[in-house]
Amino acid sequence: MANVRLEDIKRRFNNVTAIEDITFEIPDGEFWVLVGPSGCGKSTILRTIAGLETATSGKLYIGDRLVNNIPARQRDVAMVFQNYALYPHMSVAENIGFGLQMRKVDRKIIQERVMNVARSLSLDHLLDRKPKQLSGGQQQRVALGRAIAREPQVFLLDEPLSNLDAQLRDDTRAELKQLHQELGITTIYVTHDQVEAMTLADKIVVLNRGRIQQIGDPQTIYASPANQMVATFLGSPPMNILPVIYENNGFDVSGQLLTIPAVVKEKLQLRQGHSYDLGIRPEHIFINEPPTRQEANESQLIVEVKVVEPLGRETLIRAGLPGSAVVLNIQVGGDVRPRPGDRLSLQLDLNQLFVFDPKTGDRIL
Ligand code: ATP
């Protein structure tokens, strides 16, 4: 096993800078997830660590070894891709043992290791099958097994679950987590799925446009995002962003005044008449019942229900602010079922507000 250290890594493709200023160190045995929207550079980082891409500049260490100029085969890493890439003419056992066979490991040892790996992935009853006789989930487990059997120092996984259907995806995700707990191999996992990132990671690296936005454990990033991009990327449904103007000691939200407590005001140091983006997560919005009159309670917002999505344990409501295009996601208990067209009075948990600079996206509060 090994730690992985990237120092100021940059990769350019002709005129395009795919990634830059990439610096982080993954301690031995940890599970890190690189997450971000399509094109943010996560695969390029992973491929650079694997040795499938060369960094334009910067230093890359695996363990204490500088590996910039070491070919992929000699880096002692194993990569699993989203499209399994199994050898179709080989059996499951041969696929899992392939890396060891290439290294001319003794046949007996290969057999033993293939059996152990197959058992840990519940593949031991399928060892004689060919890939096309397996389900997608089983094929993906074989691909994982092939990587595990090599006993690499580092695991690199590029969207390994994205070809699986929803149920299988959840199951395989849990298996992966368990496997990591058992093996303790340093793992770097690329995904654009924030649920995978939140559930699997010791640490998440959020990327956007080739740059790191924030590094931290899932809970910290969720509770304390560095900027609007991170705030809206992690969380499902995503954080609501309301364009507001700060005036009369409150926020003007499309013509409705949201008064804010003195403590929040003191922290904020906002400027009268200036525009801000207010952020509030769907679970921090409550419905006032019965609706109070606007005059009676100025920290409420009146909205009109557009769509109601019952999800069993909870209900997701999409509601619009009258006279504006702003739509709010509200997450409430499963027993709350308003109807489209209903007017609701909402209470925002003002201790859970975020405030962003609308120009830069930087977080002010
Ligand atoms: P996705 O989730 O869509 O796979 P990603 O976050 O993994 O995206 P990368 O594949 O790392 O993103 O690509 C980062 C940027 O680098 C993109 O703008 C992409 O177009 C560019 N890029 C990647 N590989 C090449 C290449 N071989 N030649 C030119 N540009 C490239």
Image (spheres, rainbow, N blue to C red):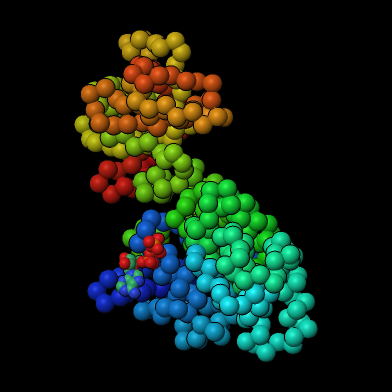
Which residue appears at 29% of the width and 43% of the height? Answer: 357
Report the front residue among 164 and 317: 164
* In this rendering, position of residue 131 left or right of residue 309: right
| Residue 164 spot, x, y in % from top left | 53, 55
**Quadrant in which ligand 1 is drawn:** bottom left
| Residue 235 spot, x, y in % from top left | 46, 43
Report the front residue among 271 and 57: 57
Q: Quadrant of residue 322?
A: top left
Quadrant in which the N terminus appears: bottom right
Which residue appears at 49% of the width and 42% of the height? Answer: 223
Quadrant in which the C terminus appears: top left
Query: How many numbered badges does the structure rendering display?
Result: 0
Q: Is residue 314 above or below residue 166?
A: above
Q: Is residue 58 above or below residue 20?
A: below
Report the front residue among 167 and 274: 167
Q: Is residue 158 above or below residue 249?
A: below
| Residue 292 spot, x, y in % from top left | 39, 11
Which residue appears at 61% of the width and 55% of the height? Answer: 172
Q: Quadrant of residue 99?
A: bottom right
Residue 293 appearing in the image: yes
The residue lying furthest to the front in this view is 133
Q: Is residue 10 above or below residue 219?
A: below
Which residue appears at 50% of the width and 20% of the height? Answer: 336
Residue 152 appearing in the image: no
| Residue 136 spot, x, y in % from top left | 56, 60
* In this rendering, position of residue 165 left or right of residue 321: right
